[in-house]
Image: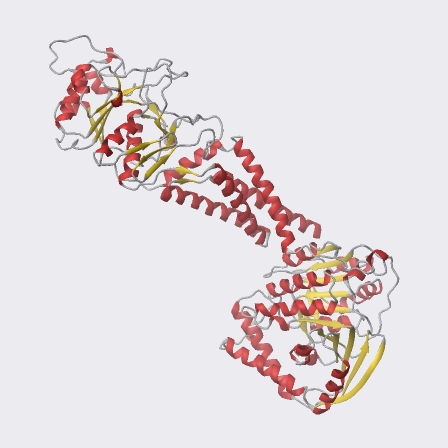
Amino acid sequence: MSKLVVFSFLGGDLNKGFPVVTAQLWHHNQFLLLKLTGSLPALPELSELYRRWQLLYASVHQRLGSNQRIKVHSQDIITNISVNDFDEVCQQLQAHINAWLKFESFQNIERQLRTLLSRDDEIRVVIETNIVLLHRLPWHLWNFFEDYPKAELALSNHEYASPQVLPKSPTAKVNILAILGNSVGIDIDQDGALLQGLTDAKTTFLVEPTRKELDEYLWNLDWDILFFAGHSTTIADGEIGEIYINQTETLTIPHLKNALKTAISRGLKLAIFNSCNGIGLARNLADLNIPQMIVMREIVPDFIAQEFLKNFLIAFAGSKPFYLAVREARERLQGLENEFPCASWLPVICQNPTTVPTTWQELCGNVGDPKFLGEVSTKGKIATPKSKLLTVLLSTFIVAVSTIGLRYLGVFEKIELQTFDQILRLRPKEEPDPRLIIVEITEKDIQSRQETTLGLKSISDSTLATLLNKLQKHQPRIIGLDIYRDFADPPNKLQPIKLSTEISKKNVVVACKIPDSKYDSQGVKAPKEVPVERQAFTDAIADPDSIVRRQILMLPPEPPLTCTTTNSLSLLLATRYLYDEKIQPKFNEDYVQFGSKVFNRLKYGRSGGYQQGVDLGGNQILINYRNTDYQTVSLEDILSDKVNPYLFKDKVVIIGVTANTLTDTWSTPYTATQQNHQPIPGVFIQAQMVSQVLSAVLDQRPILWVLPYWGDILWICGCSVVGSLIIWRVRSVSEKGCAIVAIVVILYGVCAIALSKQGLWIPFIPSAFGVVVSGVLVQYRCQIKRVQRL
């Protein structure tokens, strides 16, 4: 049951007291139940206390750095105060107001009112006065409002009349004229977004309009609600309110008097000034007999203005009575008072006592409609952050699914591989692996020994036998021969060292080549003197851009069996080296394990950035290139005994041809960026492959790995969702653009750190694509709203 209590302060002031205070109790504004008369004594200290509170309030908020919807002058700021000082003044102000209203003559009014009021009554309490200071006082601190949870305060001028409203046809929408004025130093976009989200409202936005534009909109169209956000102030000792409609023009209510009177006569029922110091605006607009207003008593921070508007619209558009919607939205601000002191003191209703507060259903034209009788309307809901969140999530989900689909089709494969290379190159230079040394057979070695008749990919048996014999004297742990020996020199009985003798030694591993339908259909056999357990294939595999990024550890033998081994040269060399370290391998079709280190194969079909057109058969892993040069020794230096005898002791020695005319050259992520794009001989790739296995097992160097396919999907979706939510929460369009860039940069950093520290190849390109497209959609949506406001 709704009741109206009007307190009239007739004559007097705080310095002289109020000899006559009347109270009227109305039932539904229809008939008078009770009229009482009392008085209140002088209380000049309340005036001084309030002015001190007002000055401290402005100073505290200025020191806290909150964006205000008014300019606070530096001379009005007190710098030597603490929050505790301000709290003490707040408590004193509340105590003085309640002590003043306990004066016996006024208590007689309160006691009689309480006999006719119930705690369950909806009570509208109107303070009727022409004294500015009484309008500014925080009357909600009166204990009466604690006892009546459905009571809310409103202010009124002493003189008013019932507005003359012309009849108009009901509409299905609430017509809102939203003026977004000068916003320098503040953010009012969120205010507009909240109004835009009302599902039963048609909001017309005027962004920084001229006086002429605003006047024409008030004259020519019917409005239910007038809304203003921006800078405003009160001048002339609180008698006149002023709004900043753009960066050069300010207006007072008298400037728009005729247009506003016309708008009120055509049905304008509510004005909301979500700006600072609105008491002067309310007093001026009340003279035009507008039914209701909501204003802010003092300077208001951006966030508080937005939170109040959001909570009020949710409650009011959700069918709560106007006064209860304002009280709920106001009281919700109390939870923010650690950061924004006295936030719940700011909003206040200004009411024409001759009118009954409107409802959202009335503004929609639903009152009296048979289909709305006997039920609570659920239509007038604001698009809350929850509903907006669902919209953002839905659009992001669509983007993420589309991104995953494009990745599945291989759209991102090339640039993903290039990004992988780039991140590898960002890593600092490493020390050479001390366990490896490369014996180079250079162009000079071949020419000086006149061995070109044997072909560019080999040297003579006698030279190779001599090389192996000299190396064995230096006690290497294992020797890998990255030279094909599918032919033999003519018999030479004078040759003191036989190649067959040298390659039959147990620490020598020789190379063979698996047949390749594309380049070599025959393959290359290993020397017959070497058993299969010391044979290893040296086949490398390049990506479509001719860069070697993968290492083949094992391949199942396939006919024709030219090369019968299943192990690669790099794996066999590493295995034999680690065997002496008492580390036994475990082989499986999906992984190779040394101790606790597991080398998981890239999954066949799709794995990491490989999505289309790449053969991932066999046991393949990514190569974790060591950004360094390996120690090398030339063939001539060894044969001429120009090397340190301890250089090869207990090491892995790999022998290979590095002659300029060699066709066995390959590109790596490091050589691909060189100015001349010079490939490197295959023996250096073999050294990288051996080194990565030994370093991972013995030095805990990261093994490169990728997420499972479902892990990639979750990562891409997660990045898109998190990125779009961050961008959605950022307010201005320029800040959204900066947020997109920042998120992509951070995402790149995360991917780089993950690859460098943990060896995890995270899909950067598709996740960044999802973030950018989702962000652009959010930004586009905000831009469309701004265009609609114009």
Of residue 78 and residue 746, the one placed in the foreground of this image is: 746
User: In the figure, 452 relative to 689: above or below?
Assistant: above
User: In the figure, 40 relative to 509: above or below?
Assistant: below
Q: Position of residue 257 (x, y in %)?
A: 79, 67
Snapshot quadrant of residue 752: top left
Q: Say if residue 650 shows up in the picture.
A: yes
Q: Say if residue 19 shows up in the picture.
A: no
Q: Position of residue 262 (x, y in %)?
A: 83, 64
Q: Which residue does the image show at 60% across and 41% down from the upper left?
A: 398
User: In the figure, 732 relative to 586: above or below?
Assistant: below
Q: Is residue 581 left or right of residue 117?
A: left
- Dividing the image into 4 quarters, which one contains the N terminus? bottom right
Q: Which residue does the image show at 20% across and 32% down from the upper left?
A: 651
Snapshot quadrant of residue 209: bottom right
Q: Position of residue 165 (x, y in %)?
A: 86, 65
Q: Position of residue 210 (x, y in %)?
A: 72, 58
Number of marks in the image? 0
Q: Is residue 508 left or right of residue 779?
A: left
Of residue 697 and residue 364, the one placed in the foreground of this image is: 697
Snapshot quadrant of residue 433: top left
Q: Is residue 603 left or right of residue 291?
A: left
Q: How is the rendered protein coloured?
A: secondary structure
Outermost residue to the right: 167
